Amino acid sequence: MLVRLTDGELTVGELAEPFPMTLQAVSKHLKVLERAGLVARGRSAQLRPSRLQGAALKDAADWLADFRRFWDESFDRLDEHLREIQREGPA
Amino acid sequence: MTETATAHRIAITRVFDAPRELVWAAWTDPDQLVCWWGKRGWTAQRSSLVLDVRPGAAFRIVSVCDADGTEMTNEGVWREVVEPERLVFARSPDGDEEELTVVTFTDLGGGRTELRFDAVVRMPGDRRDRAAAGVASAFDRLADLLEGSR
């Protein structure tokens, strides 16, 4: 559903179309995504088109990527350090 | 949204061409730790370093960005110290709930060592507030949703 929303706003009916799901089930999933801050929904009566709310998702993803990068780069440096001290031989 | 729903696991496995005792020493000897700790372009400060690798003892590592002098602090408490195979430390970035990191050192023989790093992380600060509203847990649910949508 999120992938489909990358093309723009869609109503529940449009969103449900390609999936073997009831409108009710799609609405339920949308509600979860909305609570999670990933999707925003319009107020136009029953149609309530949904759109992606990217910033929150990006923030969280950026933070996790940064944490991972900290350790990936630390371990690269650890690898270099271990090679270096072994070249030097026992102190 | 429960607290556990906002936690993520970051797991990294690396193999080093060095015997296990050496890899262990690189983690536990302050003079060595500052040689590799942190992202490239950052330097861990030896002068203010508190490592003190004993169960229950605290560590504190301040790193400085070479480019602009920005400081960053990593701190926590050692929970398990099993030389030379296992280190567990706890961080509590928001002063409340602990996040455990487990580092396992496995002797592969032939002077090679496998390091397994397994951390539980939660979103800090304002991101954490939003995580409480479910942003982070959305990642956990995303897979389920996509699975269920197929």
Image (cartoon, rainbow, N blue to C red):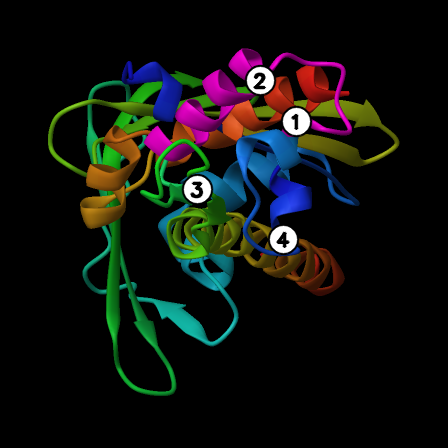
Range covered by the magenta-colored residues: A16-35
Task: Out of A64 and A23, give the one closest to the viewer.
Answer: A23
Instruction: Tell me the mark number nearer the camera, choosing from 4 and 2.
Output: 2
Q: In this view, does B40 lie to the left or right of B63?
A: right
Q: What element carries label 3?
A: strand
**Circle 3 sits on which residue?**
A39
Q: Are marks 1 and 2 in contact (CB under 8 Å)?
A: yes
Q: How far apart are marks 1 and 4 (CA)?
A: 15 Å
Kind of residue at badge 3: Val
If you read the primary sequence from the N terminus, does the residue marked by circle 1 or circle 2 appear first?
1
Determine which quarter of the picture holds residue B138: top left
If you read the primary sequence from the N terminus, does the residue marked by circle 3 or circle 4 appear first?
4
- Chain letter of disc 3 in the image: A
Q: Main secondary structure of the magenta part?
A: helix
Q: How far apart are marks 3 and 4 (CA)?
A: 11 Å
- In the image, residue B102 lies at what x, y percent? 48, 23
